[in-house]
Image (cartoon, grey):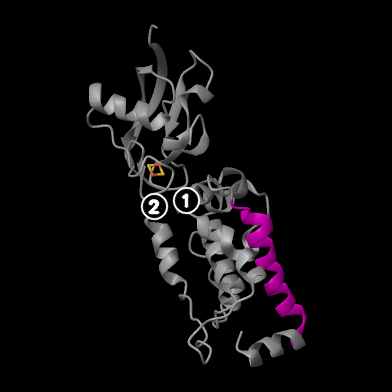
Amino acid sequence: SKAKAAKLRVFRGTAAGGDFQNYEVETYPGMVVLDAIHDIQAKQSPDLAVRWNCKAGRCGSCSAEVNGKPRLMCMTRMSAYPEGEPITVTPMRAFPIIKDLVTDVSWNFEMAKKIPPFKPRPRDADGNWRMQQIDIDRIQEFRKCIECFLCQNVCHVVRDHQKKEVFSGPRFLIHLATLDMHPLDTLDRREMVKRDFGVGFCNITKCCTEVCPEHITITDNGIIPLKERIADDHYDPVRWLLRKVAGK
Ligand code: FES
């Protein structure tokens, strides 16, 4: 059978400026957008910059916007788009462009460094840690995060409000929720969650949840409960005191 061709419009440029370049690639069954980008690199524009690693949806490196929607390029089938219409591939919008499809995501790693790590209580006398299954189940889905930063990219508080100093974005609120809900953790980060990570700025539009390639229920299972835990503390001094006495 004759190979089909697909049209791509790919952003080429740097922080100083850029433009779209049109390409045509031959498609094949199962082809993903990252394959098309690699094909362009191999045959047409060897200097096209793209970040990737696993090609299996595991490393979170190949985040970009395809037809304006945040996607992992390696998990996005070419066949998902209407035949004959150009597919537009652009770098993530919330982060500074380095070159072509590669953005500078170092702000995320700076945020990560600000979060005090897991601090477990001592083991039981027999050397084990005991936890309730229900407590494990609550945080298990959060651990699927591959740090693709698509949730950060799509969050309009991050995108539009220049709050990168005071708002950590959904990925790190999820990390903070994981720690706060962890049955073994002893560190109280709740004041910090408000003050340094800006949980109050999230207005629950759930854009993050919609784009998560791991289907983590970021807003309903992570951010809203985190907000509630902090609010409970705030409005219930008895609860606050008991928690403080209990060391959590
Ligand atoms: Fe690793 Fe796409 S290349 S997630």
* Marks 1 & 2, CB-CB < 8 Å contact: yes
Q: Marks 1 and 2: which is nearer the front?
A: 1
Give percent across and percent down for residue 46.
22, 29
Q: Is residue 233 magenta?
A: yes
Give percent across and percent down for residue 21.
35, 23
119 lies above or below 52: below
Q: Say what secondary structure mark 1 lies in.
A: loop
> Number of labelled discs?
2
Residue 9 seen by the camera: yes
Residue drawn where x is 68% and y is 74% of the image: 230
Q: Is residue 44 left or right of residue 157?
A: left
Say which quarter of the image contains residue 54.
top left
The residue under label 1 is 149
The residue under label 2 is 105
- Dominant secondary-structure state across the stretch colored magenta: helix
| Stretch in magenta | 216-237
Give percent across and percent down for residue 216.
59, 52
Residue drawn where x is 65% and y is 49% of the image: 206
Residue closer to the observer: 37 or 122: 122
Which amino acid, mark 1?
A: Phe
Quadrant containing the C terminus is bottom right
Q: Residues within 10 Å of mark 2 (few under 14, many from 20)?
A: some
Q: Is residue 69 magenta?
A: no
